[in-house]
Structures are given as C-alpha cells and as structure tokens.
Amino acid sequence: MPATQSVNDLIEQLKWRYACKKFDPTKKIPAEIWSQLEQALVLAPSSYGLQPWKFFVVMDPKLKEQLPAFSWNQPQPKDCSHFVVLAIKKEFGPADVDRLVNRIVEVTGAPKESLEGYRGMMLGSVSRMSDKDKEIWNRSQLYIALGQFMAAAATIGVDTCPMEGFIAEKYDELLGLDKKGYHAVVCCAAGYRAADDAYAARPKVRYATQEVIEHL
C-alpha cells in the first residue's frame, strides 16, 4: 500500500508534537477521529502478539474531575477531550496464551493443531517468568502501544500528553480497574492544546542525530 503522506509531512508533525501541558476543555475530538485513534491502540504490536493489556478511555466529566487529585494536581486529565488509562492484567498466565491461540484460529482459519508449536513456545516463556518478571514484561508492552498512539495522534493533528505522575492504586479504585482484574501503568491525555500553552512554542530539545544514532 503506498504511503499516504510524505516523509517531510511526517517529520513536521512529529516536530509539532509535544507533551501538551494545557488543553482547551472546550475542544473535543470528533467521534470519527477518535475511532481511528482507538484503532491505533488496537493495532499496536506486542511480544508474541499476546496483547497483555486493556485501554480504558475516560470521557465521563464527573470521573475526569476527580483525577487531578490523584495526579499530583495536574489538570490534563480533567481538561483533555479523552483520557486513556493503559493497564495490564494483574493475573497473566496460560489462559492468556490459549486466548490468543483461539483468536488466531478465529481470524485466520488456521487449524488449531497447527499452532501447537507456537503455543508451546509462548507457554514456555510465560512459565519461566516469576510474577514480577511478567509484570515488568507486560508493563513494557504498554509503552509500545503508548508510543504508537501518540505518533498516530500527531499525524492527524491531535495533541497528547503521556503521564506517569499519578497514584495508580487510586486510579484502579476510582475507575474500577481493580475489580476487573487490571492495574493502571501509564496514561495519555488527548485533545487540543490551549492557545496560551507556553510549552507549545518552546523549541524541541533533542541531541544531535549522530549522538543518538550509530550505523554499524
């Protein structure tokens, strides 16, 4: 499939992107645009394709109003259009491997027995991990999804702000994640920047290309 935008356009949009500190609460992401950003999350890659996550989109104003108190008083959760909480499953094991195998059969039509080797490889990896190792592994997967979501948003002119500054246990309790078997890891506010957000005009500070990329 041919590219739908030029390389220059892509780089310009990535330069345009920044961690939005002040959203315009009067501007909402249109439903048709948001549905595309949700698909960017759905299509995010993960190790083995296991997708050990769930993305909770907070849109209820009453819930959003309560989030800054558990986010070191940052206003982004309240003022943004859509607030995404990226969460991992608290219990992750063989059942999750079988769930993926069943989904592969459903989507591709492949005989289940043909996937036994792949299933065994995944089960082997999962079984060798301690609970802490699985948590670390699955948390890492969420950042892949976060990066894809933010890049996708930038290409269509939607502002984002990734957030680790929050009390995860309080989020779990307020949003009911704990009762659903999930734990909040990282969040991302999405919407449109306020006209007076001073951070928008600041130069992007990055090391020189030759300092961070080395060709071997």
Image (tube, grey):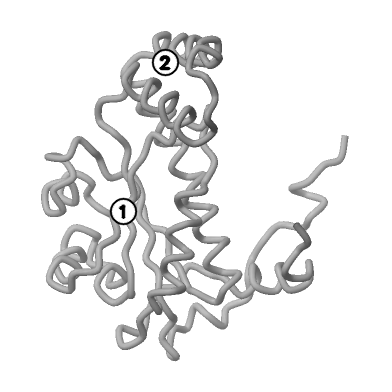
Proximity of marks 1 and 2: CB atoms separated by less than 8 Å: no
Q: Residues within 10 Å of mark 2 (few under 14, many from 20)?
A: some
User: If the image is split into quadrants, where does the C terminus sit?
Assistant: top right
Q: Amino acid at mark 1?
A: Val
Query: Could you say which disc has been placed on residue 36 in the image?
Result: none
Residue 68, above or below 46:
below
Q: Amino acid at mark 2?
A: Val
Mark 1 vs 2, N-terminal side: 1
Residue at the image position 70 percent from the left and 74 percent from the top: 12
Q: Secondary structure at mark 1?
A: strand
* Residue 195 location (% of width, % of height): 44, 90
Residue at the image position 46 percent from the left and 52 percent from the top: 41
* Residue 13 location (% of width, % of height): 65, 72
* Residue 160 location (% of width, % of height): 45, 68
* Residue 186 location (% of width, % of height): 36, 49
Instruction: Quickly name the residue at label 2.
Output: 126
Residue at the image position 47 percent from the left and 52 percent from the top: 146
Residue at the image position 36 percent from the left and 85 percent from the top: 27
User: If the image is split into quadrants, where does the N terminus sit?
Assistant: bottom right
Spot the residue most to the right.
216
Q: Nearer the viewer, residue 164 or 56?
A: 56
The span from disc 1 to disc 2 (Cα, nearest Å) is 25 Å
Q: Nearer the viewer, residue 120 or 177?
A: 120
Instruction: Quickly name the residue at label 1.
Output: 85
